[in-house]
């Protein structure tokens, strides 16, 4: 009785050895993976970032110490200026509820009547799911509370509740929570501080749930996964994603100068509630990681 919803995650890891290519620098390899991933899974909040050791720079042949290849469909937080009222509007779009999209048989057009009919049925199944509705509503309430700490009193509202959005491989249940930033006391940094980590990656209530998750996940760090990546502008605007549908690459030292070795890590998981079925949750984890796993396989094969 201490948590309504636990967003339990796992880390899938693989070691990949590739031949070094004379026409590419070592630090370019992760970006090759990112390009494959964004082709396979176009997403509105995709991002790529290399992190270097302090003694390295991106003009050298050194690999990044960590690379994030992210094809996230989820907006964590944005702060944008309302041109009509000259105030700043904060928005979050939590995703809770995922189901596989029907792609069709080989050679079958996605615009065919059969594919559309099947996907309409799948989307309705997600829309009617009591479990997914409960998950989504709990996170919406959590975010309303988080945004209420930095927004004007009475301005936090939910213009879209449990909309179904479609992506390359999945349909997802997405809600939109907005509020007017209290410019007298808060800025973009304050918004992140009030809301981080994203409720869709923790559960509710947030603090106690994170303590339980730390026990379940045996204290293993999630790394960049389930964090956020984006920009903060000098004009006060901001846009941050949730780092999901992502591969995290770290180089593995090796003694063969003709090869490069990488550890690839994929974070994936799902929300556990009283209505959860263990087999369904496992299948959802595999579904969410499928396109990233497939992209890594393509990337590895293309280097040989």
Image (cartoon, rainbow, N blue to C red):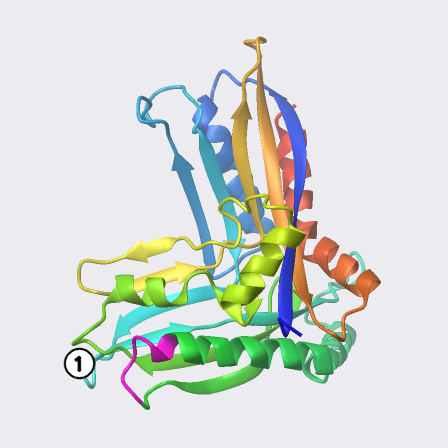
Question: Which of the pair 257/298 is nearer the observer?
Answer: 257
Give the residues drawn in magenta, as a range.
Answer: 147-153
**Residue at point 65% right, 81% down?**
133
Question: Along the horizontal axis of the image, is 187 left or right of 66?
Answer: left
Rendering coords of residue 199 (x, y %): 51, 67
Please tell me which residue is depicted at 49% across the width and 46% down the height of the picture.
224
Q: Quadrant of residue 280?
A: bottom right
| Residue 272 magenta-highlighted | no
Q: Is residue 120 above or below residue 215?
A: below
The image position of residue 248, as x and y in percent, is 54, 40
- Asked whether 149 falls inside the magenta stretch, the response is yes
Q: Quadrant of the N terminus?
A: bottom right
Give the percent coordinates (x, y) of residue 26. 47, 23
Rendered image quadrant of residue 241: bottom left
Dot 1, crowdedness within 10 Å: few (<14), some or many (≥20)? few
Task: Give left or right: position of 286 versus 227.
Answer: right
Q: Main SS type for the magenta part?
A: loop
Circle 1 sits on which residue? 86
């Amino acid at each position: 009785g201490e948590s309504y919803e636990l967003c339990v995650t796992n880390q899938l890891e693989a070691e990949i050895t590739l031949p070094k290519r004379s026409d590419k620098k070592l630090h370019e390899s992760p970006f090759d993976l990112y390009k494959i991933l964004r082709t396979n899974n176009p997403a509105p909040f995709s991002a790529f970032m290399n992190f270097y050791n302090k003694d390295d720079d991106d003009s050298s042949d050194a690999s990044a110490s960590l690379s994030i290849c992210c094809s996230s469909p989820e907006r964590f937080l944005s702060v944008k200026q309302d041109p009509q009222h000259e105030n700043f509007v904060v928005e979050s779009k939590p995703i809770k509820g995922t189901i596989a999209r029907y792609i069709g048989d080989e050679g079958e057009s996605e615009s065919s009547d059969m594919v559309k009919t099947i996907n309409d049925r799948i989307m309705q199944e997600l829309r009617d799911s009591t479990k997914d509705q409960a998950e989504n509503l709990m996170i919406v309430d959590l975010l309303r509370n988080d945004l209420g700490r930095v927004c004007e009193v009475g301005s936090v509202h939910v213009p879209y509740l449990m909309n179904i959005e479609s992506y390359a491989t999945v349909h997802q249940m997405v809600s939109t929570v907005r509020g007017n930033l209290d410019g007298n006391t808060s800025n973009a940094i304050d918004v992140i501080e009030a809301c981080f980590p994203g409720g869709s990656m923790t559960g509710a209530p947030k603090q106690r749930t994170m303590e339980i998750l730390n026990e379940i996940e045996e204290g293993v760090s999630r790394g960049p996964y389930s964090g956020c990546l984006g920009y903060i502008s000098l004009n006060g605007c901001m846009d941050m994603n949730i780092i999901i549908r992502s591969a995290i690459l770290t180089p593995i030292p090796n003694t063969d100068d003709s090869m490069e070795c990488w550890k690839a890590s994929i974070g994936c998981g799902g929300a556990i509630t009283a209505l959860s079925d263990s087999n369904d949750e496992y299948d959802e984890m595999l579904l969410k990681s499928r396109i990233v796993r497939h992209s890594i396989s393509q990337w590895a094969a293309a280097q040989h």
